[in-house]
Amino acid sequence: MTLDKVTQGQTATIVRINGDGAIHQRLLDMGITKGTEVYIERYAPLKDPIHITVKGYSLALRIAEAKMIEVTA
Amino acid sequence: MKTIAIAGNPNSGKSCIFNNLTGSRQRVGNYAGVTVEFTEGTCQINDEKVKIIDLPGTYSLTAYSQEEVVSRDFIVKEKPDALMIVVDASNLERNLYFTIQLIELGVPVVIALNMVDVAEKKGFTIDTVLLSKLLGVEVVPTVAFKKEGMEELKRACLKVTKSRITPKDLTYSHELEGSLEPIIEELEKHPEFTKEYPTDWVAVKLFEEDKEVLEKLAAYENKAAIETSIELGKKFLKKHSDESPKTAVAEARYAIANGINKEVTKRNELGQRILTGKIDSFVCHRFLGWAILVGVIYALFWLSFQISGEWNWIPPIIGDEWVSPMGFVELIFENIATWASEASWMGDTMKSLFVDGIIGGVGGVLGFAPLIFFIFLFISALEDSGYIARIAFILDRVLRVFGLQGKSILALIVSGGVAGGCAVPGIMATRTLREEKDRLVTIMVAPMMNCGAKMPVYAMLIAAFFAKHEAGMMVLLMVLSWGFALISALILRKFVIKGEQTPFVMELPIYHVPTIRGVLHHTWGRTWSYIKKAGTLLLAISIVMWALMTYPKTEVDPTLDENAASQVELRNTVAGKIGTTIEPVTQIAGFDWRDNIALIGGLAAKEVVVGTLGVAYSMGDVDPEESETLATRVQEEWSKPDADGKNRGPLKAFAMIIFVMLYAPCVATLAVIKKETGSWKWTLFSTGYSTALGFVVAVLIYQIGAFLI
Ligand SMILES: Nc1nc2c(ncn2[C@@H]2O[C@H](COP(=O)(O)OP(=O)(O)O)[C@@H](O)[C@H]2O)c(=O)[nH]1
């Protein structure tokens, strides 16, 4: 499952990040690493981007980026 | 003089600490060759004066962004005597991840553990002594906005610059250490390759395939052996883990950060869900969010306009009435103009230069300074509060369609997306965009919005031709300017500023009450740079424009009345000649030589179009605020039927309105574009393409319209 499939208010655990290059690096730098728990705070009013909590802080990312992140519930 | 560099994540309170340490002893500069800006200041510690460099706020030190490259190059090449890392205590793990990368660079480090008050509110305390021991660096707890811990911070910095003790070597996970081993071993045989950087750091960077370091390797003559060792390292990793090297390195760093975080942080159960979460559930709400957004932006404009132009709160220092700040600036220039025109020692030419050229040009631009100041004041406050990130969050989906992103919206609105803005603060507001391409596109299209200076031109032409549909026209013009700006953005993104969309991974910082000092500091810096431009570049351009519209002088038939005489004089000036020369081309859009001169004059500031049209239609110089008589005259003149008996007046007026909306930005805006892009190429491009677009659209309106009627 990828992160964009997780509904608001759910928690998921990161398995891996697909893709490469700058986006991959950026996600890693922001703390999206294997085994980290993410909590889906909310979707933006137009359903994209997503507001998540990771490592105790808030992060916004687009659905396109969320699709690169594999998680388990 | 000793040098201390400050690094830290965005939103960690870095600027706040920098301002506390340096006060007003600051200057802004650019790194050689790149548009990344840095601020430099000095600070007195005991009886030593120390130079302080504020590095750009970043989350990492990869080669993917200019800021990150600039930061690491500065630290390694300039070798500051100490590196201060501002760490957000309420967000320790991610901040430690960055800290670890800085520590890898092997310079003496002091940690300012900031926002300890926020951490406490969130319900945890941090053992600073233990943190200091684990990393082998000085750690000073601070609350920057209350200036708590600043003296201790200064002392710690001084201590470190003297002892120059570097932090402990960090030990990564077993897999990573094993992978790096062969690379480090090989690198030690190549001191000439690693001479600038610490060997361990080069090994990590080679392993994680850092673009810049790999390029350096490619240019190195004995690269073969090093390349082999990298392959060995990668093989080792493959045996022990299925991660890519890049992921392995990031995870190893996070593993350290996570371990340290767990050890030093004590959670107590009292932790409250901090206010930010509650505010966000309103501000980012599906319906409420939009209402709040509109309300905040409306308030920003309403307040800026009231305070700078409507409310008379400046006491009668000059004259005998209370005035608004904009009124005050106007009054100053009026007084200077009166004084100049009465000064008998000035010749007529000098008077004209002074009153029409300098005061008309520079005065007009400076007249906007109070408005720019207040718009910027509120933007800075919104920025410091954390709301701008929410605006971006809400609107990103819409703007992405046009190749922009959420944060572009602010620049567009301030530039005139809500009628009456100004592109100068709008373009300055693009600084909150970290993504270079998105920022450039935003800068290129922002001047197409309906700024306040275009309003008098619209008002005059609407009064002349569309008086019955005034409100409808204003709405139409607003929709059109958004349309042109967004579609241009899309086109520019497709064909000119190409490349895939930059990832949008943005921190939503917790809300803060902005500090007055911080906000004023920001605002004044930017307003001052605007005023300085007005005093230098704009002064020069105003004089050139004046000369173009004054010379060469002609002898006029003395029987002509004054207004007719100035029309003849204007026609024979350089501007008049240019206007006449390009008439065959501009005729396609319906503009004759008189309109051309007015449009050339509008390059100085758009509202000048009205005054110049007045002279060109021999009405004398018309005050843009009171243009009814000019409107009548233009209406009569343009409504004369053409050879085919058609009245093309309204078409021409509409073509002119759209042209004024789109054509070259005024010189004040151009100056800001130059400053913000750091490039003449983009400044010229902005001028060229917007004029071309404006002309094409004007022609289409005039020609297709004429075909239809
Ligand atoms: N509560 C609290 N707020 C702080 C502290 N330090 C800075 N701030 C606020 O945090 C916001 C961001 O600070 P700023 O210096 O602009 O962050 P920068 O992005 O790192 O330069 C501002 O509104 C500051 O007033 C602190 O120690 N505690």
Image: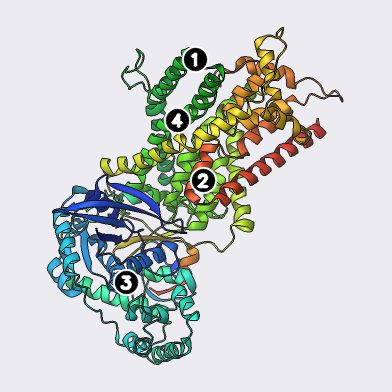
- Badge 2 amino acid: Ile
- Badge 4 amino acid: Leu
Going from N to C along the chain, the mark reached first, 1 or 4, is 1
Going from N to C along the chain, the mark reached first, 2 or 3, is 3
Query: Which mark, by number, is residue B84?
Result: none
What residue is shown with label 2?
B673
Query: Which mark, by number, is residue B341?
Result: 1
Residues under numbered marks 2 and 3 in contact, where contact means CB atoms less than 8 Å apart: no
Of the 4 image quadrants, the one containing the C terminus of chain B is: top right
Chain holding disc 3: B
Query: Which mark, by number, is residue B101?
Result: 3
Res. B572 image quadrant: top right
**Residue at mark 2: C-beta within 8 A of ligand 1:** no
B565 vs B484: above or below = above
Are labels 2 and 1 assigned to the same chain?
A: yes
Picture residue at 26% right of the left edge, 73% below the top: B258
Q: Where is residue B281 in the image (x, y as percent from the top left)?
A: 35, 51
- Could you say which is closer to the camera, residue B236 or residue B534? B534
Going from N to C along the chain, the mark reached first, 2 or 1, is 1
Q: Is disc 3 surrounded by few (<14), some (14 to 19) or many (20+) residues within 10 Å?
A: some
Residues under numbered marks 4 and 3 in contact, where contact means CB atoms less than 8 Å apart: no
Going from N to C along the chain, the mark reached first, 2 or 4, is 4
